[in-house]
Image (cartoon, rainbow, N blue to C red):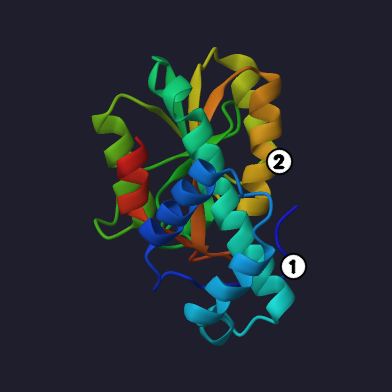
Amino acid sequence: MAYKFNFDLAGLSQSLFKEIARLFDETNVHRKIGEASRRLVKSLRIQEATGLPLSDALMLVEDLVDTYVENLSQRRLFQKTKKRALLLPHCSRKHMDNRCRAYFDGKIPSYLCAKCSSDCLIRQAVEAGERRGYDIYILPGGSCMNRILSQKDYKGVIGVACCEEIKIARALLKDFHIASQAVPLTKNGCSNTQFSLETLESIL
């Protein structure tokens, strides 16, 4: 289930959240980060940047840190895998209308990128994944993941989504005994969502 609010953290460095996650993981306090999250929300001015109430801003920061902590915990296992998939959100395409020439194949189910816009975030992510030998899926929703995983014997999966979807996906991946890494959206919504390509490339 996606967040009931929209956010835009595209202007903030994702490396900051990764470093915080590393520190929390090393000190084993990532499950007790309430006060630390409040300080982080205040120092980064996340409420002002997003216009979110404090409770939503705290939820967002804690979920981001938890996402990166989980990445750290699964990193070594993921690096040992050979057959991998990259799952991308279709809502990060440059265009959500017929200007996007991606074709949806219901048998997979996934959009197939036509690489029609050089500045499309999805095209750039697809090309980054292809260079590293990933099977790539551009999903219209998280429900497609179960069908893909049932059809293929993947050992490692990278998913790009909002943190709420990442939590659901990780539970499913554990059921399939698949090591995972995740890239959280920095801007959510129904279209023009964003994620850090730099973060994705560092994880691939």
Distance between the Cα atoms at labels 1 and 2? Answer: 16 Å
Read off the residue under disc 1.
4
Packing grade of label 1 (10 A; few <14, some 14-19, many >=20) is few
Instruction: Find residue 153 and report its horizontal and vertical position in percent.
Output: 54, 12
Instruction: Find residue 132 and report its horizontal and vertical position in percent.
Output: 27, 28
Packing grade of label 2 (10 A; few <14, some 14-19, many >=20) is few
Does residue 172 sit above or below 62 in this rendering? above
Residue at the spot x=61%, y=49% of the render?
Answer: 29
Residue at the spot x=65%, y=81% of the render?
Answer: 52
**Could you say whether the residue bearing mark 1 is in a helix, strand or loop?**
loop
Q: Which residue type carries mark 1?
A: Lys
Tags 1 and 2 in contact by the CB under 8 Å rule?
no
Instruction: Find residue 84 and report its horizontal and vertical position in percent.
Output: 43, 22
Furthest-front residue in this view: 27
Q: Which residue type carries mark 2?
A: Ile
Does residue 103 sit above or below 38 in this rendering? above
Residue at the spot x=67%, y=43% of the render?
Answer: 167
Instruction: Find residue 110 and report its horizontal and vertical position in percent.
Output: 53, 36
Read off the residue under disc 2.
168
193 or 156, which lies in front? 156
Q: Quadrant of the C terminus?
A: top left
**Could you say whether the residue bearing mark 2 is in a helix, strand or loop?**
helix
Report the label total: 2
Can I make out residue 141 in this image?
A: no
31 or 159, which lies in front? 31
Residue at the spot x=43%, y=52% of the render?
Answer: 18
Q: Tell me which numbered mark, 1 or 2, is placed earlier along the sequence.
A: 1
61 or 169, which lies in front? 61
168 or 135, which lies in front? 168
Can I make out residue 185 in this image?
A: yes
